[in-house]
Image: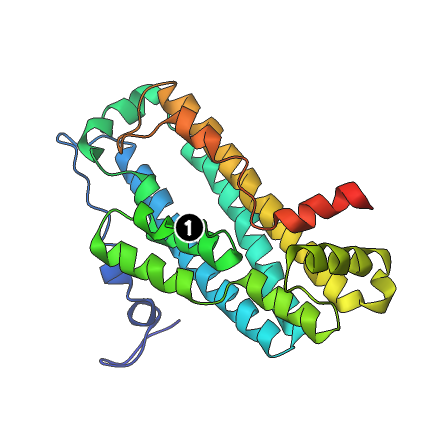
């Protein structure tokens, strides 16, 4: 960016690079070569999670404002991030299981299971089983998830949009009828139908990332229990999660 006068904004100061690059603190002693890789990849995931939370909030708000084209634009960005996150696993898999074992014991009892932003994505998207906020590990996390559970989701905003288009969604019977009408007469509701497909793509890509992550964990630790107490067997139980089961079930009735 060329020479910058003292005190002026620079590339490094704008991005706060000294602080960011000082956040990769290895716990292994002597330092394990692959611990830096492990930290960088997972910090990158949390940054992408932050962006996804921001974009999903924007999508939700835009749908309530009836700005479907702009909402679809940001959903396309969410899709791109999800594809990128799946590719990041390939970088992590350049670490051999033996190399992971050099520092794995230092991670106890930390676990990706504790990521609040990951759960925020789930709740914002529309996955919100009763009491889900209790999955957080501490009071701060529980407060964040409780707030998310109390506010509208992307699915709530989508249902509100359908109501606006004369497709009632107030009870399961009406919802089924309205979704079938939307699908069978998609030319009458083109922007809403393709938005519904965007939601399915989001659901699918997130599920593919989950599945790829489970395979990576099994490749690293096999059937052993994870550092946070979970493991591959638990992770496999999450693979059937869907944000929009109503949209998936619609396929069976067309």
Where disc 1 sits, the SS reads loop
Residue 122 lies, in percent from the top left, at: 47, 52
Please say if 216 is above or below 182: above
Residue 94 appears in the figure: no
The residue that appears at 21% across and 35% down in the rendered structure is 109
* Image quarter of residue 204: top right
Q: Which residue lies most toward the left here? A: 29
Q: Which residue is mark 1?
A: 130
Q: Position of residue 152 (x, y in %)?
A: 49, 67
Up/down of 32 relative to 195, above or below = above
Residue 70 figure quarter? bottom right
| Depth order, front residue of 58/81 | 58
Left or right of 110 on screen, residue 3: right
Q: Residue at x 24, y 38 (%)?
A: 110
Observer able to see residue 221: yes
Q: Nearer the viewer, residue 21 or 79?
A: 79
Which residue is located at x 59 percent, y 48 percent?
Answer: 203
């Amino acid at each position: 960016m060329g020479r910058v006068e003292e005190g002026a904004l620079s590339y490094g100061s704008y991005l706060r690079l000294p602080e960011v690059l000082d956040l990769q603190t290895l716990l292994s002693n002597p330092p394990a070569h692959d611990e830096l890789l492990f930290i960088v990849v997972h910090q990158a995931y949390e940054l992408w999670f932050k962006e996804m939370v921001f974009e999903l909030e924007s999508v939700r708000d835009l749908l309530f404002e009836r700005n479907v084209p702009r909402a679809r634009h940001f959903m396309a960005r969410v899709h791109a991030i999800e594809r990128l996150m799946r590719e990041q696993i390939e970088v992590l898999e350049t670490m051999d299981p033996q190399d992971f074992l050099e520092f794995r014991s230092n991670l106890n009892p930390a676990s990706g299971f504790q990521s609040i932003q990951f759960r925020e994505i789930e709740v914002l998207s529309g996955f919100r089983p009763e009491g889900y906020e209790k999955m957080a590990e501490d009071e701060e996390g529980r407060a964040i998830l409780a707030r998310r559970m109390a506010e509208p989701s992307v699915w709530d905003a989508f249902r509100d949009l359908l109501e606006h288009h004369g497709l009632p969604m107030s009870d399961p019977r009406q919802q089924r009828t309205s979704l079938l009408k939307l699908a069978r007469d998609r030319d009458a509701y083109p922007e809403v139908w393709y938005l519904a497909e965007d939601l399915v793509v989001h659901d699918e890509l997130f599920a593919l990332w989950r599945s790829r992550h489970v395979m990576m964990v099994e490749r690293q630790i096999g059937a052993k229990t994870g550092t946070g107490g979970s493991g591959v067997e638990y992770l496999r139980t999450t693979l059937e999660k869907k944000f929009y089961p109503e949209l998936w079930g619609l396929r069976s009735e067309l």
